[in-house]
Image: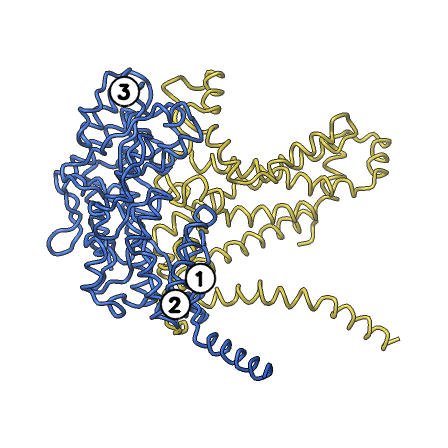
Amino acid sequence: MKRQALTATLIAYAFLAPALVLMGLFTFYPVFYGSYLGFTDYTVADLASGEGPRWVGLKNLQFVLGDPLFQTGILNSLKYLLVVPLLQIASLAVAVLVNQKLPLMAFFRVGYYIPVVTSISLAAVMWEWIFQKEGFLNWSLQLLNLINAEGRFNWLLNEHTALWAIMLVTFWRGFGYYMVLYLAGLQSIPAELEEAATLDGATAWQRFWLIIVPLMRPTLLLCSLLSTIAAIRVLEEIIVFTGGSGGPLNSTYTALLYVYNKSWGNMLNANFGVAGAAGLLIALVGFALSYINFRLTREERGER
Amino acid sequence: MFKRWLTASVLALSLSALAQTQIEFWTYYLSPNFDNYIKSTIADFEKENPTIKVRWVDKQDTMERDLTAAVALGKAPDVVNLWQDSTFAAAQNKILTPITQLVNRNVLNQLYYPNVLDMFVMDGQVYGLPWYGWLDQGVMMYNPDLLQKAGVDVRTIRNTDDLLAASARIKQATGAYGWLPPVKDPNGASFLGRFFLEGLPVYDKDGKAAFNSPAHVALLQKYVDAMKSDVIPQELLRKEAFQLSNELYSQGKAAIVVGAPTTLNRVKEANPDLYAKTRIASAPLGKAGIQTGGAMSLVVPRASKNQSAAIRFALFVTNRTNQVKFANVVPIVSTAAGSENDPGLKAKSNDPLEIGKGMNSASGRLINPGFKPPKNTDDIYKNFNDNIEAAFLGRKTAKQALDDAVAFWNANAK
């Protein structure tokens, strides 16, 4: 019996091994090496001349923490997190709606998913048109008498609105993705549970809070973690809408844009030490937020 | 007998293979549009140099990182096409062999326009052979209907001040923009170009940034006012002027495009009727009377194992014959000395694009890069652009913005 168990274990590890090796090479090693670089002086000149990184301790971390551009970046990244609860609530609500057996539901499910598969460059053309001074958003607001003709402005060129405008694009792009995940979660809930609750006289609202939400907790945790991490490392939208400058007036300059500009933005001017230190700080923020996410879920279960 | 012949042939083939050098040539965004030109140039070179074989690789947005990685891995290409800023950065990071170690400077002086060659000089050494160039001003392309509607006679537009004045009249009379000047293009510091076009220096005699004199401030203020009154669009703070000009001109929402005549290719595609109407004139210049612009270089990485074959090939690609041929494929500006008199650059018809191409391609002697970028261009330009943007958005006065940019530049330039 023991021998059988050992064989089963070995077979299991044999199946896991290829994936672990690949993850080790392409995920864990870069993460650890990148973090190590954060404590070294290492530039393109060193790389080109074959010189290795030189240990400098906390110098890069001190530099990054004192750099006003990184401070702006991390602040903007934290602001960006506001998209997470909105995105989760909206996609869960719509998932519950499209989970109904009503006509045209298949059409809506596909419709909501289209932005997920739309390329960001294509989406940018549409959203730029919406956000411009003579665009759809101002036109709609004017129609609702919320602004007048003089009140129109380009949403991407105003430092108070640019970040929110880009967050709206992230919301639009992520909405269908999370909705599908929630939909999958909802469809795994046995129909009998809801039916039994209905027979017991539970209202739709009670069924939602007392049956659906507790059973959806693992999906909720997964989705909120994924969107938190996505928000803290937002980059694509920023580059597309601001040309990588993080404008106007750095109001859309995020922490990951800082890392990108210090490393890959113009590699011939790259400073891997500074980029590594900034990346490490962002990772720490990501870990902290993930921990909070886990804690919140545990508290809800009463497992303190 | 046959056996002996076979052995001799195999031996001869092996020896010729041994004597043959293979070099790797990296270009930047030239494939697939210019495949025929590049391949035929390589074929011509290989015919003249049977012992050298060229392997061509076209890189796109990963050029800089691929070059860095290849050098680090010991698999460096032999000839690489870079921008001026990238050439400087690569030279500063000791990635490149100084060309002057491979070719005598006097020879280079005879082969290329001195103004363009000087763009690739750092610490007294030339680091890149000038290849195809461009002019920021180039030529002026205009929509005669919009100008007529605004009562603007094109002959009265002689300098950049006239351009701004004409733009104001066009905007007022037609609602379309006139001219869209680059003020904050990404990956550069466009407004510095406005300074040296008007004869205002970027550096003082000690090499310190000094673009905050009252004349500099007044010039910035003039453009800030133009944006404030919507004579030039605010969108120029977010989009490259070239891209926005193209879009708006093709839609009939801008009357004038100043730049490379290649713009007309896009207009021809997007709006053939407007293309047929479009007229060409000389580009109005600033008070300095210079055309600003730049050039791409061909460099030889220090880690190249075939430096003599590499430089031979780079000299061949950048010679006048090949640059003029290239200018006939796409209106690049030839950087080879004497191109202004080359019969290959004369317009062959009255087509606007043909006239523009001829005028533009033979103007390499007019390219003036204006100033040498500092080592840490990324940080310096970012700060400069942030300050320019703050002035345009009214968050700083023009004086404050330029004072802050100069202070940062002088404190941080390496």
Residue A43, image quadrant: bottom left
Between A30 and B280, the one lying in front of the other is B280
Colour of the chain lettered A: yellow
- Real-space CA distance between mark 2 and mark 1, rounded to the nearest whole angstrom: 10 Å
Question: Which label belongs to residue B147?
Answer: 3
Does residue B51 appear in this view? Answer: yes
- Real-space CA distance between mark 2 and mark 3, rounded to the nearest whole angstrom: 56 Å
Between B307 and B390, the one lying in front of the other is B307
Dot 2 amino acid type: Tyr
Give the structural element (helix, strand or loop) at label 1.
Answer: helix
Which chain's residue wears label 2? Answer: A
Residue B317 in picture, x, y percent from top left:
34, 57
Which residue position is annotated with label 1?
A276
Colour of the chain lettered B: blue
Q: Is residue B114 left or right of residue B149?
A: left
Q: Is residue B399 above or below residue B202?
A: above
